[in-house]
Amino acid sequence: MAPRQLLKLIAAPLLLGGVLWLARPEKVLLALGNAHRGWLLAGFIAALAANVLSACRWRRMCLWLGLQLSGRGALSAYFQGVAANVLLPGATLGGDMLRVTQVVRLGNPAWESGWSVLLDRLSGLWVLCVLSVATLATWLGAGREVPGLAAWLPGGSGAGAWVGAAALLGLLLPPLLYVWGRHGLLPLLTQRWRELFTRLLVRAGPGRLYLQQLGLSCLVQLLSAGALACAGFALGLDLAPAVFLIVAAPIFVMAALPVSFGGWGTREAAAAVSFGFFGAAADLAVGTSLVYGFYAVGQALLAIGGGVLPRRCGD
């Protein structure tokens, strides 16, 4: 095992242990032990549905890039990636590399295969951040405050307008980058790199792809935030549903960082801070994040054991 991987294996439990210690592990265990089973099941179903739609979204990207990938193949590769994310060091990086490998094994070119996974990952994180910021803008515009940030981010139409403008800019960022890449970047590249990036940028239907990715990513992130909310409700975390969408961005982004495995530790630290801004108790915040992590473990076990998954996705 490489030293970097070994360091991640050591860092993850240490970070998670530190967060649990600050949140008082006995209180976290008590909250988990008293969790409402109905909400737990609803959250797992929402998380599973989010990943099924994520596989559909990724396949759309693959088809646009000219790759051959069936609906069932996309589901299989995606959920194998979910299992790798949970079990291997590197957070989402291990699962993403596995997806690339699976697509290349089908005879697809490595360049487009790698970009299909990278663009799919960026699509999800992009829409997640846009939704979280837009929800925060609506929250502030309605005159509400974020208690932990009231001194820097007061409620009111003024703050809401500024945050809303940031969300709009985020929504326009991909098409702006595409236009810059096609008309500004390509002429500056050497012939070899120009040929490679032309294969990505000079394709039919980029506008249609943008709308497809936007729509599917919105559904994915709403389901993911819904799963997080169900986890919180199961533990008795009494917050407005909009709060879970606001805090989803920092929690999920931190979980995706390749500094641990499965997002353990980084996700819980982000949850403690993010929910804390809205006055949530640390034990409930950390417990909610743990339950969300258990949803991924459950899906990984389904993937490893050949569990029941939809057979077709957009064929």
Image: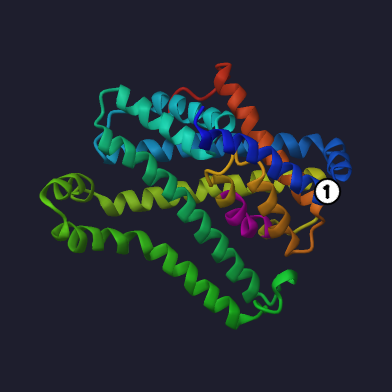
Q: Nearer the viewer, residue 87 or 54?
A: 87
In the image, the segment drawn in magenta is 243-252
Q: Pinpoint residue 221: horizontal percent, then vertical percent.
A: 54, 49
Residue at image position (48%, 33%) is 95
| Drawn side of residue 195 relative to residue 243, left or right | left
> Taking 186 as reference, is 64 above or below it?
above
Tell me the amino acid under the disc marked 1: Gly
Q: Pinpoint residue 47: horizontal percent, then vertical percent.
A: 61, 38
Q: Pinpoint residue 144: horizontal percent, then vertical percent.
A: 71, 73
Residue beneath disc 1: 236
Query: Which residue is the extreme one toward the front?
Result: 3
Q: Nearer the viewer, residue 50 or 199?
A: 199
Pointer 1 local density, CA inside 10 Å: few below 14, some 14–19, many at least 20 = some
Figure label count: 1
Mark yes or no: residue 315 visible.
no
251 part of magenta stretch: yes
Q: Pinpoint residue 17: horizontal percent, then vertical percent.
A: 75, 42
Corner quadrant of residue 239:
bottom right
Corner quadrant of residue 118:
top left
Mark yes or no: residue 279 visible.
yes
> Taking 127 as reference, is 78 above or below it?
above
> Taking 113 as reference, is 250 above or below it?
below
Residue at image position (77%, 36%) is 38
69 part of magenta stretch: no
Corner quadrant of residue 105:
top left
